[in-house]
Image (spheres, rainbow, N blue to C red):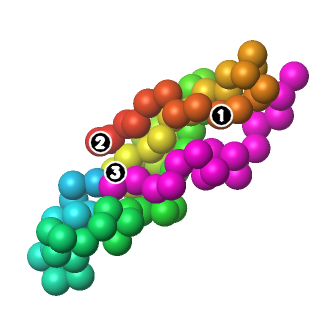
């Protein structure tokens, strides 16, 4: 049996890029089209497991516009894999 370790998710996902954040950065002259993706990447993102309830997801969406859904593949040495990217 594998215990979930949230820190593992961060090892596999560098960050999240949303259109809203890219536009905001460019409108505020904090980014230009020639900048690298990492300049507009959000490093803090909400993570939920595949068995999370819709109620929990709704509470996340009260403050965030996206969540990263993951699953633990037990047959692959308990590594976490991104299953879905959900936006509201």
Q: Quadrant of residue 25?
A: bottom left
Q: What's the CA distance linking mark 2 and mark 3?
A: 5 Å
Q: Nearer the viewer, residue 61 or 16?
A: 16
**Magenta segment, which residues?**
1-17
Q: Which mark is residue 88?
A: 2
Q: Is residue 7 visible?
A: yes
Of circles 1 and 3, the one toward us is 1
- Which residue is located at x 63 percent, y 51 percent? 11
Which secondary structure lies at badge 1?
A: strand
Write down the residue under mark 3: 65
**Quick check: 76 left or right of 37?**
right
Q: Nearer the viewer, residue 45 or 41?
A: 41
Query: In the image, is residue 46 above or below residue 74?
Result: below
Asked if marks 2 and 3 touch (Cβ < 8 Å), the reply is yes
**Marks 1 and 3, the one that precedes in the sequence:** 3
Query: In the image, is residue 33 above or below residue 84?
Result: below
Q: What's the CA distance linking mark 2 and mark 1?
A: 23 Å
Is 5 covered by the magenta stretch?
yes
Q: Residues within 10 Å of mark 3 (few under 14, many from 20)?
A: some
Which secondary structure lies at badge 2?
A: loop
x then y, percent, for residue 28:
17, 81
């Amino acid at each position: 049996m594998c215990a979930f370790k949230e820190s593992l998710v961060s090892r596999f996902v560098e960050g999240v890029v949303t259109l809203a954040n890219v536009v905001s950065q460019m409108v505020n002259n904090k980014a230009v089209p020639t900048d690298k993706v990492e300049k507009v990447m959000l490093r803090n993102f909400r993570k939920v497991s595949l068995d999370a309830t819709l109620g929990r997801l709704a509470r996340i969406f009260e403050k965030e516009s996206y969540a990263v859904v993951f699953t633990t593949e037990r047959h692959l040495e308990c590594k976490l894999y991104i299953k879905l990217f959900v936006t509201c």
